[in-house]
Image (cartoon, coloured by chain):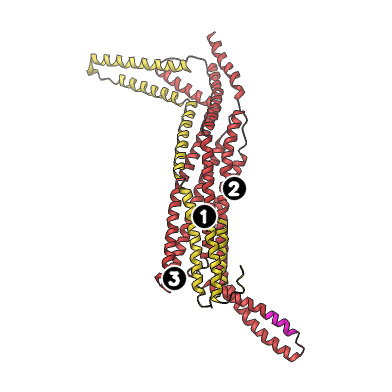
Amino acid sequence: MNWNNNVSFADWKTSLRELLDDARKAVEQNDDRAVERVYGRIEQFIVASDDTVAGVTELDGVARETMRDLIVSAVKRDVKDIADRMADIAELEKRFANRSAVNSSTAAALRLERVRAALDHTTQTIASLRALSESLPTELGGDAAKIDQQIQDVIAALAKLGAAVQTKL
Amino acid sequence: MKTLILLRIPLVLTLLVCSSCRTLPSLQPFADSTAELSLSVRAAGRATVADAQELAADWDREADRLASDEGDAAAKRIREQAAELTKSAAELDAAWTATSRMMTAVADYSSSLAEIAAAGKQGRASAEAVGSSLKALLDGVGASFPVSGEVLALSTRAYGYVAEARAAKSLAQALREAQPAVDEVAQVVRANLEHAQRINRMLYLGLVTSESDPARAGFDVGAERGLLRRANAALDQLRAEIQKALKEADPIARDQALAQLAERSRGLQAIVAGSEAKLGPVNAAIAQTRKRGQQRAELLTATLAAVDEWASYHRRLLAGLEKKQVPSAQALAAAAADIRELLNLIRTKS
């Protein structure tokens, strides 16, 4: 498109109308490269247009509005395409979160964490029970002996647990 | 005899599982690269949202200028367009936040794979820790440890090989089960990044145009460019007239013509120099904005390439584990390094 020969308002108006037609076609065809090209040509039109000719300043205003419309409609369309995938994305996030939990559990099992936790917990329980047994008040009399026996039975049961773990290992 | 049997079992296990020795890769580089990729996807989205908000703000300023110069009617349409762009920026922010959360889950998944591989390699240490816990328990009940230190050492070493083999198997299963989701993630993220590339190109057309807005420049840039263009055209015309005057046969007439042309030339050159000086900062700002747009585009392109490489590596890792060969993560690490460099460049320059 050559504007060098444009002289009158009618000449400039015709040039702008052709550009607006090209812009409309580019948007309808969803041709983003064509949209970018016509944006550039409209910008050149504004720079080249002779605003000493009456009415050309208003044509420049129409041109600027069209440039902004091209940006708004292109961005809106691409944002909608991204937003339309949100449900799929949320589902994928869940799938990966579930898979991570399974993998971490597998790793913990490989590290024998649960076995260690059971053994450590049992050791602590035995230590607590021993402390309880040693701190039983004498005022309890015969009851103290009964309680102490029960504590010893529990300790023996926990020791069997340790033996069972040892056998398993 | 019992001791001999106990000794033999770990040795047998060692022989049986040694075929899978050293096939368990360290997946920490893969996990680290995935974390970088996740950050890059997040940063790319944030930058695009920020650019859309900046352009909407530019249009609002333009509307303010027009409202004060020409009245509210002139500004109305620009404000509507700025509001539409702001709305799109908010929608993009929400959609990209969801994408970023998904990528965080993907990064966590990659870390969990590295966790399996690491647990497989730490088998011996894990067995030793269990041995210590068991000894503490047996000490607590006054029982002695049932096997000698030598047998214990063999057992823990054997578990080391068992753990590695189990980890390799678990890893292969985990990768296999996740592969369809990995392919879907790559497809979705690629599509989103391609849309972001298009959005980026349109926004930067607008941001570059905004640099010429009179509200920002402080003068009518379009009018000044028009003046410069006409002055340059007049200078070209003058040069042609000077060439013609030089061919004048009458020396007095020639000298008079040349003196007048020189006077006009000086006047035009002063106009050109003045316009160029005035437009200098605007042109520099335009160049800077174009450069920023180019950096954004490079980050999006690099992130796209990294997503493809990540999905490809996951597939090669699965195939490699099944063939007991570990693929190199070098290309993925290089892609992650490219992204890191671009992100640093954008952070220091913005």
Who's red, chain-wise?
A: B
SS assignment at label 2: helix
Give the crowd class for mark 1: few <14, some 14-19, many >=20 residues within 10 Å: many
SS assignment at label 3: helix
Residue B308 visible in image: yes
- Circle 1 marks a residue in which chain? B
Question: In the rendered structure, does residue B241 fall within the stretch colored magenta?
Answer: yes
- Percent across and percent down for residue B253 are 72, 90
Determine the residue positioned at 59% across, 73% down: B276
For marks 3 and 2, the one nearer the N-term is 3
Q: Is residue B40 above or below residue A58?
A: above
The residue segment tinted magenta is B238-246
The amino acid type of the residue labelled 3 equals Leu
Q: Are marks 3 and 2 in contact (CB under 8 Å)?
A: no
- Circle 3 marks a residue in which chain? B
Give the crowd class for mark 2: few <14, some 14-19, many >=20 residues within 10 Å: some
* Residue occupied by mark 2: B338
For marks 2 and 1, the one nearer the N-term is 1
Task: Look at the image and give the colour of chain A.
Answer: yellow
In this rendering, do the residues under marks 1 and 3 share a single chain? Answer: yes
For marks 1 and 3, the one nearer the N-term is 3
- Percent across and percent down for residue B232 are 63, 76
Indicate left or right for B245 with B328 as reference: right
* Residue occupied by mark 3: B66
